[in-house]
Amino acid sequence: MIAEEIHRITEALPHGVRLVAVSKYHPAESIREAYDAGQRLFGESHAQELQRKHTDLDGLDGLQWHFIGHLQTNKVKFIAPYVSLIHSADSPRLLNEINKQAQKAGRVISCLLQLHVAQEETKFGFTPDEALAYLDSGAWQQLANVQLAGVMAMATNTDDSHRIHDDFTLARRFFERARNDYFAPLSPTADTPFAELSMGMSDDWHIAVDCGSTLIRIGTQIFGQRDYGSEGGMISETEK
Ligand SMILES: *Cc1c(COP(=O)(O)O)cnc(C)c1O
């Protein structure tokens, strides 16, 4: 089942689009099954759950952990030594803390700016204006141990595919503008590291890919429904 879904999705992806298998609330055995099917990028959204799985699965060659959920500043230290991409950098304060913990771990951590484009109340993410103001401030250039690598966005939770398309298009325009105005000039010869646009989940990834996504984050379609009672043992209601 897991292997079949992974193959079904990856075969449908255009060149340059990668799959992040979102394994939150699913056990280490499911991750191993996906790994055996060739999957290497895994997304988690709780620091302690990731920490536990990282320990359980240590030694799987080439497995990379992506952090995709809201990250509390006091949890950054748990994942800084090994996380390969943080999709959900949603405030200057969090980026400062990631920089600090990356420095302690002797690493540079790649991060995506989480952009709030959905037509709904959520506490997390930069609005496009806030994100532009942050880029304009140049504060990110002082963060020697953070590499801004692109943008992450979630569409409005709706069945209206036009609405979803509009949200993703807004994120894509922001991404291109940021890349051209702030990052391309920094690397005139090489490709800019600001190259990832993370959008698309189980229900909307086809639209996201049409809108230029480079990283899709799929959980339910691969692993089935999440059982919030199982892995949730160590996770408080408010963290979901
Ligand atoms: C859980 C989660 C996903 C995966 O959602 P599915 O609908 O299960 O594919 C993707 N992105 C983020 C940020 C998530 O928290």
Image: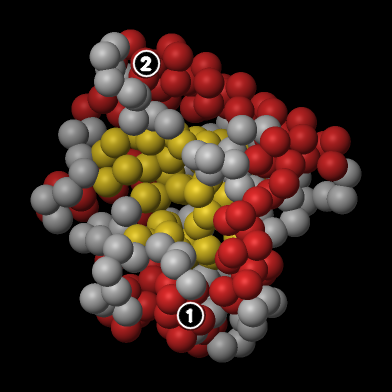
- In the image, is 149 to the left or to the right of 133? left
Which residue position holds label 1? Answer: 33
Secondary structure under the numbered disc 1 in the rendered image:
helix
Q: Residue at x 59, y 64 (%)?
A: 7
Question: Residue 184 shows which numbered tag?
Answer: 2
In the depicted structure, whether residue 51 falls above or below residue 232? above
Give the label, 1 or 2, closer to the camera: 1
Q: Nearer the viewer, residue 8 or 233?
A: 8
Which part of the image, by quadrant, shows the C terminus?
bottom right
Q: Picture coordinates of residue 167 (x, y %)?
A: 72, 34
- In the image, is 77 to the left or to the right of 21? left
How many numbered marks, from 0 up? 2
Q: Residue at x 50, y 49 (%)?
A: 18
In the depicted structure, whether residue 137 falls above or below residue 140? above
Task: Tell me the kind of residue under disc 1.
Answer: Glu
Q: Earlier in the sequence, mark 1 or mark 2?
A: 1
Which part of the image, by quadrant, shows the N terminus?
bottom right
The quarter of the picture where residue 162 lies is: top right
